[in-house]
Image: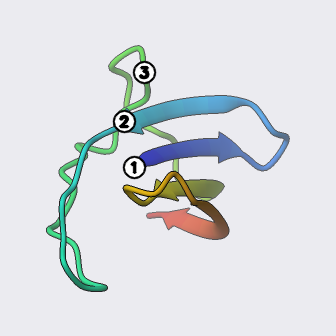
């Protein structure tokens, strides 16, 4: 699973790359401390995140949503 967090202007600020094996539609929580790739806290505001999931057969799905940091 690949999670990318972007500013609304499109700048990539955080990448989380993790492997998750699950038999169903649920997944364990993915820890994130709210910091960017340089270790700085993200500023309050709206961000966009993209989740990319691939199954064992190699099929891939992407989902893009908004994220609000308070």
Q: Looking at the picture, how far across and down is residue 28, in whole percent?
A: 14, 68
- Identify the secondary structure beneath mark 3: loop
- Horizontal placement of 66 versus 30: left or right? right
| Disc 3 from disc 2: Cα separation | 12 Å
Residue toward you, 68 or 61 = 61
**Which residue does the image show at 81% across and 39% down from the upper left?**
10
- Horizontal placement of 21 versus 4: left or right? left
1 vs 3, front mark = 1
3 vs 2, front mark = 2
**Mark 3 packing: few (<14 Cα in 10 Å), some, or many (20+)?**
some
**Mark 1 packing: few (<14 Cα in 10 Å), some, or many (20+)?**
some
- Horizontal placement of 26 versus 35: left or right? left
Q: Looking at the picture, how far across and down is residue 12, in whole percent?
A: 65, 31
**Mark 2 packing: few (<14 Cα in 10 Å), some, or many (20+)?**
few
Q: What residue did someone put label 3 on? A: 37
Q: Which mark is residue 17?
A: 2
- Identify the secondary structure beneath mark 2: strand
Q: What residue did someone put label 1 on? A: 1
Residue toward you, 47 or 1 = 1
């Amino acid at each position: 699973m690949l999670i990318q967090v972007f500013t609304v202007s499109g700048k990539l600020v955080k990448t989380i790359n993790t492997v998750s094996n699950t038999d169903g539609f649920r997944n364990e929580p993915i820890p994130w401390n709210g910091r960017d790739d340089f270790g700085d806290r993200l500023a309050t505001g709206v961000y966009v995140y993209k989740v990319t999931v691939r199954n064992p057969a190699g099929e891939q799905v992407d989902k893009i949503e908004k994220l609000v940091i308070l």
